[in-house]
Image (spheres, grey):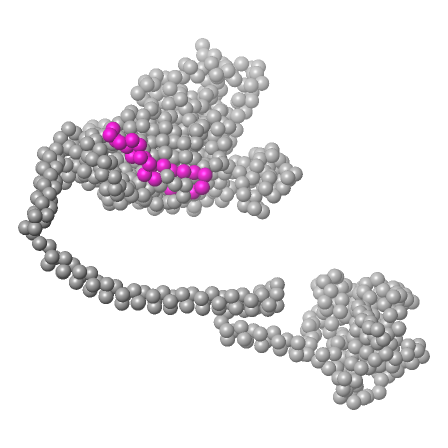
């Protein structure tokens, strides 16, 4: 009999069973129709289908009976999945290492976990990571939060996370697009999906990891990442399966690590949950799932061969920061970087076209080409003689690809070398090298070297800056001995050394063959980022050139002998040469004069610009410093208009009412909610109304330069105590200028003082509306006796003002006046004293 699940489960098995059931509950979110509609609204599915169909139509169809059994729609659907993965990784979702500091925008540092807020709990945030910014704060205060959402519809909006969020959101999108999907959970902390493919023979579940944009590479995690796998469970809407053997090259070596639960119990638990999932299915669906299950069991129990490992499964993890990958020990596995094969390029009749050997490399295609763009080798490593700590990096987000030092290499310098050898029938005439390098930090360096078996290593370039294509030609050297040794050489080498910069990302600061990913076959354009041309001559042609050179040298010697004997005269040629030199000297003098005039004019223009800028600087420095004037850098006419209007501001004396009558009636009703500025505006309007009432009684008119305080003191002092006027003006200025609150309590105190002033206005006799400004100033500043009985005085004496500034006003005769004393400030009194006379400014 088959072993049954025991009644008494261990604590580990109970926890494992709850975990399996939680996987089922999570997958139900992908079957929700409303969730699928939200996913379809974010995916350009029709565009991706058109691209997949175009790629299928333009591809060559393999021949054979096996391919004829596959429907074209199934193949197009598989291509659509690849396009969907590429769009999801490169355009839709982003990786979250740590949130940015909202203050300085720098990366933050994790300080632990926190409690999810009610809003985060409503979005199914299972836990929250807390981060601090060490650049802004030193007390580990919280500056950023990273909730780990489980709801895929929330992830459609946030579009960021780690592998759990990536697989969660991608599974919902695949279900919405019509794919049969499994959510795969690796108990060594990774998540991905499996998609059922009808475009493969036989039909089967295919590994798909959206984080790495990896398709059908199940051994990637064990071989490429070096993970020690234990349990891998795949869950769908109607099935659950232990798929660990699919992701291990040798399942028997993995079994000792599977010690969390008993294997017999795990099989029984999976069978029990599978029956519960399929209880409501139709018979045809059950039969289909049973056929798939039998076929999958055969696949899982079939041992894998050593040659089953693909090159794409030997790559280390690319998603996440280097520090994060190193902490998880997922940078690479035991066989990620194969050793160099010491490849040497042969220069002979098969590779020479029109006397030139040409080698190109394209980092986007990762291929070498010779003979006008014909691809000779794929993979940069397959065309080098030696390399150390160099790898090819693709930046899908920035659409760039390049060679760079290995991320986790201990030494800072990485090297790469190409070697070339000539066939016996050829000789080197000339060598041209074009190579693109990119340096983004002064600590990083790039060195280019050239050598042959006849010549020692020669440094062609060594720099710590630049992003350009460097070109070198062997004929640029003036050393004749060096050229003769190059001509005799049968091998030569081109070597590059990349020295990393400082910091965790120092490896990225020096790059080789940086190129934009465009999707075009750039090898055919001849605008290569790496090109080596070697012009060669056959040995018989070299011998003929040498004989011709000797003949020319001998003819030169014979001509010299004839000249010495007087048999040849060169006098005529010398006269013609002197005439030509004089003619050129005359032309050169005129040309030189033009250059001098042009240079003088240019110098004058530069000095004029410099002087104008200096004058502007001094003008701005002395103009309303330290602030920049309004209208800076505007046209001169606009600046003049701005200055004219600013100068006209002090002459504006009109003070409008700030509170409309209808608004006043609305808020003055009992029970109406008044805004915070209502009493402030009411007080300003009351003061204006008091001044208007004084004008209606034909009292003196206030001048434009005269303050309200001095005006009231001059007019009302005969009828009211000056302290009342000062207290009223203090509250008026507090309502108009002071940012502190001015509420109902302050307004009541203001109203009491206003009543006293209004009663004083009623008792005043009309006067002439024309007052001399000089008399007003004199009356307000001339010293007079400070008699308490003299109420008709138009100004205050200096001793009286000093007493007012030194003592507190005792006006607390009632509750309203007490509130007034606490809410109003003392008026400012400035006393300027000289030897004998004093002037007071209130």
Q: Residue furthest right?
A: 789
- Could one spot residue 194 in this view of the protein? no
Residue 437, x across and y down, in percent: 35, 41
**Residue at the image point whose x is 37% and y is 45% from the top:** 467
Residue 15, x across and y down, in percent: 56, 22
Q: Residue furthest front?
A: 565
Q: Quadrant of residue 804?
A: bottom right
Q: Work out whether residue 581 or residue 148 is closer to the camera in this orientation and state it.
A: 581
Q: Which residues lie in the magenta part?
A: 438-461
**Residue at the image point whose x is 50% and y is 38% from the top:** 96
Q: Is residue 355 found left or right of 671 in the rendered image?
A: left
Residue 672, x across and y down, in percent: 73, 64
Image quarter of the N terminus? top left
Image quarter of the C terminus? bottom right
- Could one spot residue 340 in this view of the protein? yes
Q: Say whether residue 446 is magenta.
A: yes
Note whether 309 is above or below 486 in the view shown.
Answer: above
Q: Residue furthest bottom?
A: 768
Residue 181, x across and y down, in percent: 40, 32
Q: Quadrant of residue 492?
A: top left
Q: Work out whether residue 770 or residue 162 is closer to the camera in this orientation and state it.
A: 770
**Residue at the image point whose x is 38% and y is 26% from the top:** 336
Q: Is residue 374 found left or right of 97 in the rendered image?
A: left
Note whether 64 is above or below 446 in the view shown.
Answer: above
User: In the rendered picture of this protein, how many numbered marks are placed on residues?
Assistant: 0
Q: Residue furthest left?
A: 567
Q: Say whether residue 391 is magenta.
A: no
**Residue at the image point whose x is 26% and y is 45% from the top:** 527
Q: Is residue 822 found left or right of 120 in the rendered image?
A: right
Q: Is residue 58 found left or right of 508 in the rendered image?
A: left
């Amino acid at each position: 009999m088959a072993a049954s699940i025991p009644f008494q489960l261990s604590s580990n098995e109970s926890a494992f069973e709850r975990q399996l059931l939680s996987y089922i509950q999570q997958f139900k979110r992908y079957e929700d129709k409303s969730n699928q509609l939200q996913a379809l609204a974010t995916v350009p599915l029709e565009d991706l289908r058109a691209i997949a169909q175009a790629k299928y139509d333009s591809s060559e169809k393999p021949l054979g009976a096996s391919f004829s059994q596959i429907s074209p729609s199934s193949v197009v659907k598989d291509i659509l999945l690849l396009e969907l993965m590429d769009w999801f990784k490169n355009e839709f979702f982003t990786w979250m290492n740590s949130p940015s500091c909202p203050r300085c925008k720098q990366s933050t540092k994790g300080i632990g976990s926190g409690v999810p807020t009610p809003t985060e709990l409503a979005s199914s945030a299972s836990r929250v990571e807390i981060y601090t910014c060490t650049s802004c704060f030193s007390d580990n205060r919280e500056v950023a939060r990273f909730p780990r959402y489980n709801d895929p519809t929330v992830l459609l909006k946030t579009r960021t996370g780690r592998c759990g969020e990536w697989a969660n959101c991608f599974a919902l999108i695949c279900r919405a697009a019509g794919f049969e999907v499994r959510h795969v959970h690796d108990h060594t902390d990774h998540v991905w999906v499996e998609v059922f493919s009808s475009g493969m023979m036989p039909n089967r579940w295919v590994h798909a990891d959206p984080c790495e944009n990896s398709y059908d590479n199940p051994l990637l995690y064990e071989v490429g990442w070096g993970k020690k796998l234990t349990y891998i469970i795949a869950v769908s809407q109607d099935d659950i399966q232990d798929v660990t053997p699919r992701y291990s090259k040798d399942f028997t070596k993995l079994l000792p690590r599977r010690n969390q639960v008993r294997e017999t119990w795990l099989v029984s638990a999976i069978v029990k949950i599978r029956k519960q999932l399929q209880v409501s299915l139709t018979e045809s669906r059950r039969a289909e799932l049973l056929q798939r299950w039998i076929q999958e069991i055969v696949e899982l129990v079939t041992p894998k061969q050593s040659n089953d490992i693909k090159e794409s499964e030997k790559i280390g993890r690319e998603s996440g920061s280097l520090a994060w990958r190193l902490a998880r020990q997922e940078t690479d596995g035991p066989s990620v970087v194969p050793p160099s094969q010491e490849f040497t390029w042969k220069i002979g009749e098969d590779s020479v076209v029109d006397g030139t050997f040409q080698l190109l490399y394209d980092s986007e295609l990762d291929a070498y080409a010779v003979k006008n763009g014909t691809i000779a080798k794929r993979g940069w490593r397959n065309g080098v003689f030696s390399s150390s700590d160099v790898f090819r990096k693709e930046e899908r987000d920035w659409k760039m690809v390049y060679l760079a030092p290995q991320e986790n290499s201990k030494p800072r310098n990485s090297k790469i070398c190409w070697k070339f050898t000539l066939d016996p029938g050829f000789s080197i005439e000339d060598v041209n090298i074009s190579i693109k390098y990119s340096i983004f930090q002064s600590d990083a360096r790039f060195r280019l070297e050239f050598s042959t078996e006849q010549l020692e290593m020669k440094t062609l370039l060594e720099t710590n800056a630049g992003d350009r294509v460097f070109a070198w030609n062997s004929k640029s050297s003036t050393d004749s001995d060096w050229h003769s040794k190059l001509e005799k050489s049968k091998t030569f080498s081109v070597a590059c050394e990349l020295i990393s910069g400082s910091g965790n990302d120092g490896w990225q600061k020096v790059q080789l063959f940086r190129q934009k990913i465009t999707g075009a076959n750039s090898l055919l354009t001849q605008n290569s980022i790496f090109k080596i041309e070697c012009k060669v001559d056959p040995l018989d042609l070299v011998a003929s050139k040498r004989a011709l050179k000797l003949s020319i040298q001998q003819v030169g010697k014979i001509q010299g002998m004839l000249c010495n004997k007087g048999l040849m005269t060169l006098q005529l040629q010398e006269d013609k040469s002197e005439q030509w030199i004089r003619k050129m000297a005359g032309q050169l003098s005129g040309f030189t004069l033009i250059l001098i005039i042009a240079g003088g004019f240019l110098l004058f223009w530069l000095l004029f610009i410099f002087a104008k800028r200096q004058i502007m600087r001094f003008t701005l420095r002395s103009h309303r410093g330290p602030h920049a004037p309004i209208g800076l850098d505007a046209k001169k006419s606009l600046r003049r208009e701005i200055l004219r209007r600013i100068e006209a501001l002090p002459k504006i004396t009109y003070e409008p009412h700030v509170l409309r009558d209808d608004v006043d009636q609305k808020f003055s009703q009992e029970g109406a909610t008044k805004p915070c500025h209502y009493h402030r505006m009411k007080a300003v309007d009351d003061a204006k109304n008091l001044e208007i009432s004084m004008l209606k009684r034909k009292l003196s008119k206030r001048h434009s330069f005269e303050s309200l305080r001095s005006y009231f003191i001059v007019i009302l002092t005969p009828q009211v105590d000056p302290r009342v006027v000062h207290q009223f003006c203090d509250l008026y200025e507090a309502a108009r200028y002071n940012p502190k609150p001015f509420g109902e309590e302050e307004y009541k105190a203001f109203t009491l003082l206003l009543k006293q002033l209004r009663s004083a206005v009623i008792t005043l006799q009309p006067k002439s509306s024309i007052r001399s400004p000089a008399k007003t100033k004199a009356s307000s500043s001339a010293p007079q006796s400070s008699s308490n009985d003299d109420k008709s005085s138009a100004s205050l004496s200096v001793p009286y003002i000093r007493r007012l500034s030194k003592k507190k006003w005792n006006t607390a005769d009632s509750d309203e006046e007490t509130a007034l004393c606490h809410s109003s400030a003392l008026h400012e009194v400035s006393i300027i004293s000289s030897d004998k006379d004093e002037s007071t400014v209130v």
